[in-house]
Image: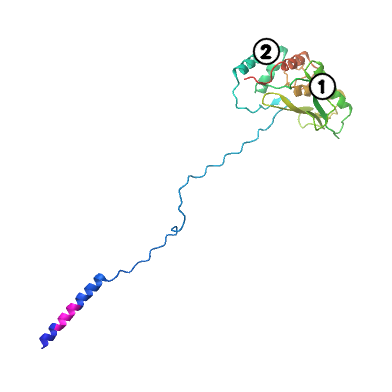
Amino acid sequence: MVERRLTGMIAAAVVLIVLFIVWDAFKPTPRRSAARDPDADAPLRIAEPPPAPPSPLPQPTPPTTTSQGTTVPAGPNGREPSYIELLARSETRRRIRSSGSSTYLGEMLETGGDSTLRRWENRTTAPIHVWFAPTHAANFQPAFIEAIKRAFGLWTNAGVPVRFDFEGDSTNAEVTVKWRIQFEIERTGQTDVTWDENGHIQGATITLATFDPKGRPMDSDDIRIVATHEVGHLLGLDHSKDSTDIMFPTAKVRDLSDRDVRTVMLLYQLTPGNLR
């Protein structure tokens, strides 16, 4: 009896063990929750090259000016000169060399450094409009205006193919004459000229002082002499190295020299522009 009961217990234990093994083998595996990709719902992104740096804005060419013969070359126009233009430049250089010391055009080109001739177009039938700006500068005298007109007349009477009209106003002025009491440096006059890329002068401003650098008041004849020098710059001349010329940096003479006249006349026979 005991033996039969023991056998039943062993058989029951074996059945339980078998059932446990079967349950462990076929029980469902619990699912693990996957971590959510933060970019799962984001739109598809395509790799792009880094943005190119912005192109620099074109800088305005500032205008070309000369002050007391100190020149700044005009900006290049990007065009190569033609064969005919090169021949013309060569002929212009030859004529300047052949003038020798009778003119100072060669000196001007060497001093300026940009090998450019500048002058007005021939203006005998359409005069250049000159305007005298009003002023309250100390020591200014109405007689100064007539002295300046005489200075212009000296150059036109020498044969320069340019005439001047003094009846205009600020609205049509191509040349403005201004006044100041005194310059901070050793000068009594200054001329600022504007020209185009072909060397044609477009306008100018002449500034005259009513007192010299030492504080001495200028008189009418002083103004005429200084104005004669400044009108030379206005016409396109630079400084001469000869003290007997009115275009010497510090005027030592009171009238035009033969070299002044020959230089300006040759200038107005030549084509303006770069000679390189």
The disc placed on residue 95 is 2
Give x and y (percent) for residue 193.
Answer: 73, 27
Q: Amino acid at mark 2?
A: Arg
Give left or right: position of 88 versus 180.
left
The first of marks 2 and 1 along the sequence is 2
Quadrant position of residue 144? top right
**Vertical relation: 35 (above or below) 227:** below
Give x and y (percent) for residue 37.
Answer: 42, 60
Measure how far apart labels 2 and 1 are at the Cα level: 27 Å
Q: Quadrant of the N terminus?
A: bottom left
Q: Which residue is located at x 77 percent, y 13 percent?
A: 258
Q: Secondary structure at mark 2?
A: helix
Quadrant position of residue 183? top right
Q: Is residue 109 visible?
A: yes
Would you name the residue on which mark 1 appears?
152
- Circle 2: is it few (<14), some (14-19), or many (20+) Cα within 10 Å? some
Of residues 104 and 243, the one drawn nearer to the viewer in this rendering: 104
- Circle 1: is it few (<14), some (14-19), or many (20+) Cα within 10 Å? many
Residue 11 lies within the magenta run: yes
Read off the magenta span: 8-15
Of residues 207 and 160, the one drawn nearer to the viewer in this rendering: 160
Q: Amino acid at mark 1?
A: Phe
Of residues 22 and 265, the one drawn nearer to the viewer in this rendering: 22
Q: Quadrant of the C terminus?
A: top right
Give x and y (percent) for residue 70.
Answer: 70, 26
